[in-house]
Each structure stands twice: as C-alpha cells, then as structure tokens.
Image: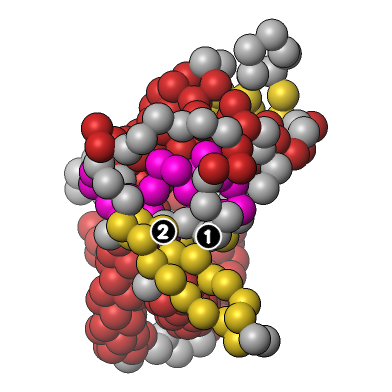
C-alpha cells in the first residue's frame, strides 16, 4: 500500500507538473498576444491623438485668422479686442502672415487623410483583447488553485510525517531505556527535509553517543529491536516474524529481548525462529524440527504457564529446537 501510495503521489505530481507546463505555455502565448495588441493600440492612440490635435490646432488658427482679417477688411479695424492667441499674429505684417498661412496649409496637406475607422478598429481590437484577458485570468486562477492544492498536500504530508516520526522517537527512547538502560533517538539528516535520510543514534551505558553504523553487531541488534518495538507500540500489527534476529546477542541481552517480547505478546503474536534456549524457555508454544531417517519431522509443545513451569536447572535441560 505504501508503494502504491507513493506511485500515486508521483503520478499526481507528474500530472500536476504536466498541466502546469501546459498552462504556463498557454499563458505565455496569451501574454505575447496581449502585449502585441496593447502596443498596437498605444501606437494607434498616439498617432490619432497627435494627428487630431495638430489638425485641430491648425484649422482653428487658420479659421480664426480668416475671420479676423475678414472683419478687419470690412470695417477697416478690429471691432473688438482680439483673443490673446491672435495678438502675436495681429502685430505681424501681412506678407509674413500670408507666408505663415501657406506653411500652415502645406502642413495640413502633409498630414494626409485621417483614418476615420481607427476608433472602430480599436474597439474591435479591445473586444478581442478583453476576451483573451478573460481566458488568461481563468487559466491563472486555475493554475493558482492547483498550486494551492499542491501546497496543502505537501504541508499535510510534512505534518503527518513529522508527527509520526516524533511519536515513534518517543517510543524509541522509552524502549531503549527499558532494554539497555541507555539513551537513543532518531532524527533526520536534514531537519527540514523529510526526503533526507533517517539517522539512528544510541548511547549504551558507559559509552558515548554513536551512530548505528559505528556500533557492534550486538548493539546494532538491540537498536534494531528497539526500533521494531517503537513501531509496534505506535502502530501495532497482528503478528511479527523474527528469523534468528537474536543471533548476535549474548545470554544477558537475549534475556532482555525475551522479556520485551513476552511483554509485547499481550498485544500481538510473535513467531520467532531461534536456537537460543532462553527464548525457547520463555515461549508459550514450541515447535521443533528434527531429522529422522533423512526426513524432517515437526513436533509441537505447549508450555505450561510461568507459575507452573519447573525451576530452570542447566543449559542442557532446555529443548534444542526452534521456538514460537
């Protein structure tokens, strides 16, 4: 289930990344089109504005001059005070004014015909631009929604992992204390990166704090048992199978493990394959495999409760068989 869940997460992440790349490409194209349309609109607006202003100024000045000089020709003088913008022309001689008039007419002719459909073209372009903008806004909104969902999933993943690791770490410290009366802990290689490796550190009595890679075989076995029981206490399973997991332990440490197994067997069933008589004596049921006439045979023994068991005598008195 964990493998399938991981595959599903990767599939979803890949799908999200693929969709995100497609959305980014669409967004880029739409932005380019919007930029081009916007630049075209600005150019058209500037040209139209300049032409209209220039034409209006020239036509207004030309008309005012014609009116003013027409009235002056009829009446022989200006009947009223001229506008301020005409004072500079009134003071100039007639020849100079006529020269200015010719220059003005030439400038008007140079402007050429005005595109009266420019406003209509602009309105059509603006309508198309608004449609593109609406689509872009929708794509951006969907993209942001996907990113928010991915962030929430990642936050939940981080929170769940850290909670699980902290709880297992508490059980790990407690079990190691019970097992060897030492200090131990688990931690990430990079505290903020849940994808980094997991470091197991333990400090047996009378020794310095060690990484699991620097421990002896027996110390590694005890640390592994501690980690197993920490997981078992956090999330118990119905049964566990241990295949000669105690092979590297001496008698004293085997007895500690046996006591821990006995305590944990109240909540789960342990199937233990072992050649250690200490574990065999503490088992509830023993199944032995013997060889008779070249054929393997299995025999089972249900041991009496602890209160009914006879006192232990010597090592040779224990049954030499695999134990459950």
Look at the picture and state if 104 lies above or below 228.
below
Classify 10 Å Cα crowding around label 2: few (below 14), some (14-19), many (20 and above). Answer: some
User: Helix, strand or loop at disc 2?
Assistant: strand
Look at the picture and state if 208 lies above or below 30.
above
Q: Which residue is mark 1?
A: 322
User: Helix, strand or loop at disc 1?
Assistant: loop
Is residue 36 shown left or right of residue 61? right
Structural distance between the alpha carbons of marks 1 and 2: 7 Å
Residue at the image point whose x is 67% and y is 33% from the top: 250
**Is any atom of residue 20 visible in this view?**
no
Q: Earlier in the sequence, mark 1 or mark 2?
A: 2
Is residue 147 shown left or right of residue 14? left
Start and end of the magenta stretch? 266-284
Place of residue 103 in the rendered image (x, y in percent of width and height, measured from the top left): 58, 70
Place of residue 235 in the rendered image (x, y in percent of width and height, measured from the top left): 30, 48
Circles 1 and 2: CB distance less than 8 Å?
yes
Q: Which residue is mark 2?
A: 286
Q: How is the image coloured?
A: secondary structure
Residue at the image point whose x is 47% and y is 19% from the top: 177
Is residue 211 shown left or right of residue 25? right
Q: Which residue is nearer to you in this view: 141 or 101?
A: 141
The N terminus, quarter of image: bottom left
Residue at the image point whose x is 60% and y is 37% from the top: 315
- Magenta includes 282? yes
Place of residue 73 in the rendered image (x, y in percent of width and height, measured from the top left): 32, 63
Look at the picture and state if 212 lies above or below 90.
above
Classify 10 Å Cα crowding around label 1: few (below 14), some (14-19), many (20 and above). Answer: many
């Amino acid at each position: 289930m964990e493998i399938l869940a991981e595959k599903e997460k990767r599939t979803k992440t890949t799908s999200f990344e693929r969709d995100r790349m497609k959305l980014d490409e669409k967004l880029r194209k739409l932005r380019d089109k919007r930029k081009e349309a916007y630049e075209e609109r600005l150019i058209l607006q500037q040209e139209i504005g300049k032409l209209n202003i220039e034409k209006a100024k020239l036509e207004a000045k030309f008309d005012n001059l014609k009116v003013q000089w027409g009235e002056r020709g009829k009446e022989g003088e200006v009947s009223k005070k001229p506008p301020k913008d005409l004072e500079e022309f009134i003071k100039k001689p007639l020849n100079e004014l006529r020269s200015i008039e010719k220059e003005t007419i030439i400038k008007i002719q140079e402007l050429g015909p005005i595109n009266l459909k420019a406003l209509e073209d602009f309105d059509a372009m603006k309508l198309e631009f608004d449609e593109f903008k609406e689509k872009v806004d929708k794509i951006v909104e969907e993209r942001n929604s996907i990113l928010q969902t991915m962030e929430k999933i990642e936050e939940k993943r981080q929170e769940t992992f850290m909670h699980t690791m902290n709880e297992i770490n508490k059980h790990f410290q407690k079990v190691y204390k019970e097992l060897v009366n030492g200090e131990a802990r688990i931690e990430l290689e990079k505290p903020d990166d849940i994808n980094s490796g997991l470091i197991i550190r333990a400090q047996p009595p009378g020794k310095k704090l060690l990484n699991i890679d620097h421990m002896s075989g027996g110390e590694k076995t005890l640390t592994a048992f501690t980690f197993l029981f920490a997981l078992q206490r956090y999330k118990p399973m119905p049964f566990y199978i241990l295949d000669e997991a105690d092979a590297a332990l001496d008698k004293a440490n085997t007895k500690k493990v046996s006591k821990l197994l006995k305590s944990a067997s109240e909540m789960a069933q342990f199937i233990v394959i072992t050649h250690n008589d200490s574990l065999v004596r503490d088992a509830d049921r023993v199944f032995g495999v013997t060889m008779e006439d070249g054929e393997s045979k299995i025999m089972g023994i249900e041991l009496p409760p602890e209160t009914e068991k006879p006192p232990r005598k010597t090592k040779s008195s224990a049954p030499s068989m695999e134990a459950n």
